[in-house]
Structure formats: structure tokens, C-alpha cells
Amino acid sequence: MPAQSKAQQRAAGAALSAKRGETKVGDLKGASKDMYDSMTEKELEDFASTDHDGLPEKVDGDD
């Protein structure tokens, strides 16, 4: 499933970095923390790898 906004893509990238041990889980906030807790590494990769050209900054419902 691709990300629907740039904000969602960034949050997935932050969560993915924490899943891989590249950043501290304690540094995550908001959507990235929720994604870390509820998504697999593969799901996060799918979101984070979405081509961001043409994506809106945010969509309704993004926190």
C-alpha cells in the first residue's frame, strides 16, 4: 500500500529507521510511533518507498 501523503511517507521512514535499530524508538512521536507499533517492517518499507512526486503534503486524516 503506498503512502497517500508526504507526511505519511516521512512518518513511515522514521518508524522504519527505528525498526531497523538505526534510530531510537523513544525519539518517535505521533504517527511514526503508531506506525512503529502497528506495522511490519515490510509494510513500512512499502509506505516509505512511495514516490513522493505528486503527493500532497498532508491529506485529511493525517496527524
Image (spheres, rainbow, N blue to C red):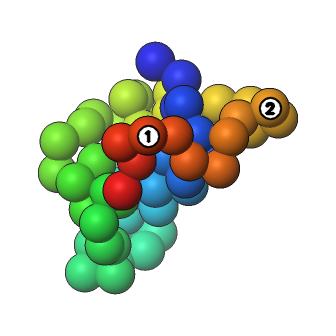
Query: Quick one: 62 or 15, which is closer to the camera?
Result: 62
Query: Quick one: 20 or 55, which is closer to the camera?
Result: 55
Q: Are marks 1 and 2 in contact (CB under 8 Å)?
A: no
* Residue holding disc 1: 60
* Residue at (17% x, 42% y) in the render: 38
What x and y, as percent, mark residue 6?
63, 47
* Residue at (65% x, 50% y) in the render: 57
| Mark pair 1, 2: CA separation | 16 Å
Number of numbered discs visible in the structure rendering: 2
Give the structural element (helix, strand or loop) at label 1: loop
Q: Amino acid at mark 2?
A: Gly
In front of the other: label 1 or label 2? 1
Using residue 56 as the reference point, say whether residue 47 is left or right of it: left
Q: Amino acid at mark 1?
A: Asp
| Quarter of the figure with residue 21 | bottom left
What x and y, as percent, mark residue 23?
43, 74
